[in-house]
Image (cartoon, rainbow, N blue to C red):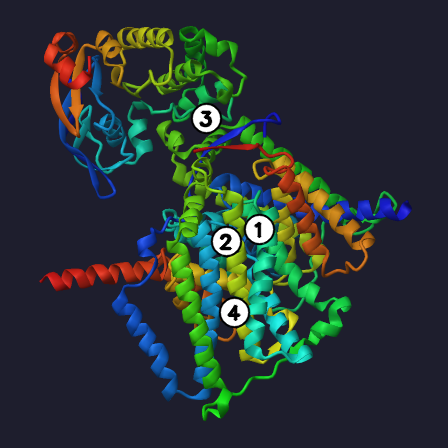
Amino acid sequence: MTAMLNVKDLRAYYGQVQALHGLSFSLNEGSLTTLLGANGAGKTTTLRAICSMVRSTGAIEFEGAPLTGRSTESIVRLGIAHVPQGRGTFTTMTVEENLQLGAISRKDRPGIVADIERMYEHFPVLKQRYTQQAGTLSGGEQQMLAVARALMLRPRLMLLDEPSFGLAPLVVRDLFKILGKINREDKVTILVVEQNAQLALELADQAYVIETGRIVMSGAAKDIATNEDVRKSYLGY
Amino acid sequence: MTAADEVEVVAEGQAVEAVPKRAMTLGAGTSLTVLALLLIVPLFAKNFIIFQMTMLLIYGLAVLALNILTGGSGQFSLGQSAFYAVGAYTSAILMEQYDVNYALTLPVAGLLCFGAGFLFGQPALRLSGVYLALATFALATAMPQLLKLGYFEKWTGGVQGLVVTKPDAPFGLPISQDMWLYYFTLVITIAIYIFSVNLLRSRSGRAFMAIRDNEIAASAMGVDVALYKTLAFGVSAGITGVAGGLGAIAVQFVAPDSYTINFAIALFLGMVVGGVGWLPGSIVGSAFIIFVPNISESISKGLSGAVFGVLLFMVIFLVPHGARQVAIVSQQLIAKYRKR
Amino acid sequence: MELFTNQILAGISTGAIYACMALAVVMIYQAIDHLNFAQGEMAMFSTFISWQFMQWGVPYWGAFLLTIAFSFAAGIAIERALFRPLAKAPILTQVAGFIALFSIINSSAGLIWDFTIKQYPTPFGSAPFLGSQLISTHQAGMIGVTILLLIALYIFFQYTRVGLAMRAAASLPESARLVGINTSWMIALGWGMAAGIGAIAGILIAPVVFLEPNMMGGVLIYGFAAAVLGGLTSPFGAVVGGFLVGVVENLAGTYIPGVGNELKLPIALALIVTVLVVKPAGLFGRPIVKRV
């Protein structure tokens, strides 16, 4: 299996403060990986660094192409979709407009129309509300919309930042089920950052644990889930 | 553009840069040097230079006032020229029509403008940013017209304005009127500067800055936002009023068209060039608005406005944060040099 | 009563001027989230360019189209050269930039074309419109073009991909980048469009206020006021605001004692500010909910 994303010695900075201290990891094509850690460990920063949303040094390669020096939008156009923390929904636009925006960098009109239909199949609740202003949707629905919007890019890699945040447990289960489906059927490589370690480890095949800007543990998700020390020291349960 | 009631959710962003409290003044060494220069230079200068230095201090006070309002409490105002005008006319009218001693007119001007600013701050409470700018713009454009109104003419002198008598040095001191006025202004300026620095360091100052940085959070923490916002307007207007009074005395006349919106815009530019929220920068800003237009005109009479614009652009490209940025960079360079 | 209706009609025709300017103001606000004080001067300069084309023999509509194209390009050029470097600077510094631009353009226009007032032609003629003494055909033409422009903008924003992208970039720049939109170019495009609309406004206004470097001074502030009154996020509101401001200005001048020509502006602004105190987001604007 080829490594789709290769991150080497990533250091990221917010002004003078260093948030990541030489992170290295890689994602295999088709894998579903989760990045775990406590608040402030650097999980969100890692995703932002991949998309060039924060100042960083180090080497990041996506399908062989280096990402350093590129703007966020050009990285996205390479096929990386990022569902940010807080979802980043265009609240003043309708559900359908949000989906259209997901595909704004694509040129194949018929493909886009077909994809919107597919999103409505994945997420029937969105179809019901397609002319509604996105800001009026519930938290769970907005999260679905954010994922659907990301999928409209037809991404090869999808990054999700704490998708379970603020959602009821049942809603989170549904969402994770859909993510699993997308990973298997649409062949989208997924990296999901989560605080909800238990659910994330159930979903993922690979896992990394981050603490204060460094990777402290990596391995198969089920190994990490069953490792007592890891659970107690890093995951709090 | 779609259906009527869409709600826009905005994360409270910062319109005015947060200058930390400790960075708001100069270090002791620099302050003393500047003070020494201000004290000594006029002793050797011609009267006209002394006059220009007096205006430098006066406009510096006006910019300082704006710095307290915008840099301190985050309220944007294009209306300072109105308060300056009120202060100027107060002094002029008291001196010329009621024979009041010039020094006594200043506290009156200051208090009157404080009251006016405080009152204006009330309706302004519900406005911010662009909307407050418009409201203060309205105030600034109204003022010259109000001053020309026939109804007030017997006090204000109408379109022609009033001539103001320049005071002599007291106790028969053998110095020129200009020099006396300069030192008089200097003492007042220093007093107001010290007052302002202490104000911003005090509890009120912290309240101002809390409001500037995040009004909702400040309110949630118990800051009486309404009181402090109007207070900031009042203090700022009061200081501007004193500056106006001094200006009237220095220039020796007041007329409506001296206090147009262009003056308010100039004060705004002075604040930006000096560094928003950086009190010592006020004098740099003042120097900019007094001297750069003259320089522009001497470079090209026909294109003086364009030259001014280009010079302004150069300044903001090089130091977008104003003179404060220059001070910080110099401090860093000096620190590096000392380490060697 | 007849005086009243007459004043209203007169107000609507001056209001068309403000409505047109307000459209340009809203356009730039949509792109960059603040107001460009130099907008009026850019419009004035464009109008002079069109006048110059006509002096060189280019027919009216040819000059019109060339000028719009030139203004569009100039707007983009100014943004790229002067304001993109300032994008990370504090907002107040950027405002100082607008003021500097104002000064440069105003002064340059004065030097190139001097300050004497010039006549500017209108394609609509200036006969009384439909027999009414108060609205000339030119003013009717102004209102017509403004409405057409409004419709065109509506279609652009609601039904085109670029329009959608621009709305997204203005609304949430970071999210827009995450769907692959080059937000930096969206801003440049916004400037270009605002400059083009401003040019149209200037060309329509010049026959009424006559062409000279200071022609837009008063108009711009009324345009701002109209845009703010209508709600800065709503082009439709801008147009309605423009007409309202025109009417209010006229009525204030006629009916409030002591208000001569000079106090019309502050009174109009004061009334607008009063509206804003009640409806802070303007008549048609989206109420803004601020989160901490």
Left or right: C179 in relation to B340? right
Give percent across and percent down for residue C254: 82, 53
Give the residue number, with chain letter if any, for mark 3: A90
**Residue highlighted by disc 4:** B243
> Residue B186 at x, y = what percent?
43, 75
Earlier sequence position, callout 2 versus callout 4: 2
Circles 1 and 3 on the same subunit: no
Q: Earlier in the sequence, mark 1 or mark 4?
A: 1
- Note whether B132 is above or below B323 in the view shown: above
Q: Which numbered marker is on residue B121? A: 1
Q: Secondary structure at mark 2?
A: helix
Quadrant in the picture for residue A19: top left
Q: Residue at x 45, y 22 (%)?
A: A98
The residues tagged by marks 2 and 3 sit, at their Cα atoms, a distance apart of 37 Å
Badges 2 and 4: C-beta atoms under 8 Å apart?
no
**Mark 1 vs 2: CB contact within 8 A:** yes
Query: Of helix, strand and loop, which one carries label 4?
Result: helix
* Dot in front, 1 or 3: 1
Question: In the image, residue C3 lies at what x, y percent?
Answer: 88, 49
Q: Amino acid at mark 1?
A: Gly
Instruction: Indicate the amino acid at tag 2.
Output: Ala
Viewer-proximal residue, A221 or C233? Answer: A221
Q: Looking at the image, can residue B228 be seen?
A: yes
Disc 1: CA contacts within 10 A as few (<14), some (14-19) or many (>=20): many
